[in-house]
Image (cartoon, rainbow, N blue to C red):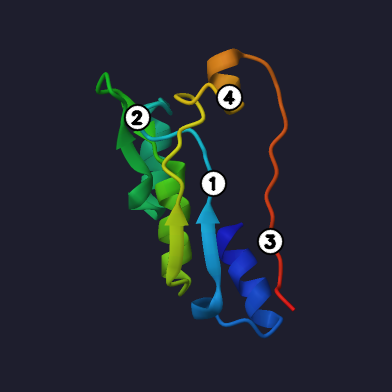
Amino acid sequence: VVGAAVAALNEQGVEPHELVALVGPAVCGRCYEVPEAMVELLATALPAARSTTRSGTPALDLPAAVAAQLTAAGVTDVEVDPTCTVESENLYSHRRDGVTGRVAGVVWLAA
């Protein structure tokens, strides 16, 4: 999705180096425990996704993976919000609370 979004914006005449990207709050690599096979599958394509939880189990760092994809696509202004949705009780987290909620992503072209 990340590469396709950058490519779609490029088709509209926006060069990747003109983009500003903010990777919003998400579950962090210290909290997103997954099976080792899942880590291996994703980390083969996106090494930045590989992480380990606080307890030493396999994990994914999806914000780092998204940032790596943006950088690889030529976006030079990439900021990652370090807030973890599991660690911050001010934010929704299905992993922490076990209930569903709503999230949104926004992309726009400035006039």
CA distance for labels 4 and 3: 23 Å
Q: Residues within 10 Å of mark 3 (few under 14, many from 20)?
A: few
User: Dot 3: what SS?
Assistant: loop
Q: Quadrant of residue 36?
A: top left
Q: Which residue is mark 2?
A: 30
Q: Residues within 10 Å of mark 1 (few under 14, many from 20)?
A: some
Chain-order first, disc 1 or disc 4: 1
86 displayed left or right of 57:
right
User: Dot 1: what SS?
Assistant: loop
- State the quadrant of the C terminus: bottom right
Residue 23 drawn at (x, y percent): 51, 51
User: Dot 4: what SS?
Assistant: loop
CA distance for labels 2 and 4: 14 Å
Amino acid of disc 3 = Val
Residue 70 drawn at (x, y percent): 48, 64
CA distance for labels 1 and 4: 14 Å
Chain-order first, disc 2 or disc 4: 2
Residue furthest bottom in the image: 13
In the picture, the disc for residue 1 is none
CA distance for labels 2 and 1: 16 Å
Chain-order first, disc 2 or disc 3: 2
